Amino acid sequence: MRDFESPFFIGVDIGRTIRAALVDERGRVWLQSRVLAERRDPRAFLRQVIAVLCALRDAEMARGRVAAIGIGWPGLIGQQTPRIALASHLVDVTECDVYGEIREALGVPLVFENEANAAAYGEWACGAAQGLHDVFYVTIGTGIGAALILGGRLQRGAHGFAGEFGHVKVESGGIECGCGGRGCLETIASGPNIVRRVRERLFSDPTFSLSPLAVQMEGTLSVPQIVQAALDGDELARAVLRETGRYFGLAIANVLNLLDVEMVCLGGPVMLAGEILLDAVRKEARKHTLRMIFEGCRFAIGALGQDAGIIGAALLARDAVAAMASP
Ligand SMILES: [Zn+2]
């Protein structure tokens, strides 16, 4: 039961699917909606987002009680003037006044946040990292993002762009990244690149020809299929996920040596792979991290699953409203 006077917040997670929910002030999800994102027309995409938000605001249980909206968006989100500086993997909305149009259509305070920051905030406020002060959060999906919580505060950097972990260099050379650089973690270990590496192995190594994954090659090989094959004991899938974990472990070790955090929390759809990936990350990180630092750090999979971004965005909106109210 909830108090009929208490406010709701709408949390939104923008990706290939637009996911949104009514969330209460304790981070509990009450009503969810999702729609496949329009990927060609930025105007149509923006209309979709506004329609999803209006439907939740006008839902029977929420009527008159939505206090603020938080939106987690992939890409670089400037903090001074909320503007989407780079939206990767999605329709390009850099020419649209996304903030202004949503604000005007909904008429409640609006907070934009990088999607990894939003998910980290969710895990920190009411998930796996609850109660901790120093956390490094990594999300692994279509892209790779990260967030830093240090001294109990989300750290955004001087311009709001901190945490671009996908562009940490883990190889000299390597294939070209969307950022224009080479050797970025994302070019090896993001969801689409895990799929690419599985495909390349299937082509190059005949000993894997009997892999169940080979049968699926004709269709659309996806990360969930690879993860499922790995969980079912498929050696190729397991080898690629372990190798992925080693790249993450190396990159994370550099962060640990620099920041000495209490927890590394891993989330995002690729973490459905669970222990297979986590174990490889932990083992590789141990090799490259100073012992005292490694021993003081826990490795965990996010507890909120796919809802981390929605809950975190809503709670960022909650806390922004509270900060506005206090003198
Ligand atoms: Zn890059």
Image: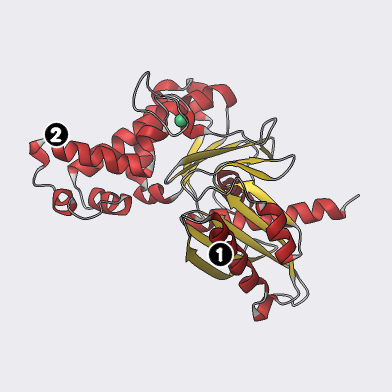
How far from the left and from the top, in percent, is residue 71?
63, 54
How far from the left and from the top, in percent, is residue 256?
52, 27
Query: What's under tag 1, amino acid-wise?
Result: Gln
Q: Secondary structure at mark 2?
A: helix
Task: Identify the mark at residue 48; answer none if there is no mark.
Answer: 1
Question: What is the C-alpha distance between the residues marked 2 and 1?
Answer: 43 Å
Residue at x-position 67% and y-position 44%: 83
Question: Nearest the camera: 17 or 116?
Answer: 17
Q: Give the residue number, with chain letter if any, for mark 2.
A: 204
Could you say which quadrant of the image residue 78 lies in?
Answer: top right
How far from the left and from the top, in percent, is residue 172?
37, 18
Q: Secondary structure at mark 1?
A: helix
Q: What colour scheme governs how the chains and residues are painted in the rendered image of this protein?
A: secondary structure
Could you say which quadrant of the image residue 104 lies in?
Answer: bottom right
Task: Identify the mark at residue 136; answer none if there is no mark.
Answer: none
Question: Nearest the camera: 135 or 212?
Answer: 212
- Residue 90 in view here: yes
Q: Is mark 1 within 8 Å of ligand 1?
A: no
**Mark 1 surroundings: few (<14), some (14-19) or many (≥20) residues within 10 A:** some
Query: What's under tag 2, amino acid-wise?
Result: Ser
Residue at x-position 42% and y-position 46%: 142
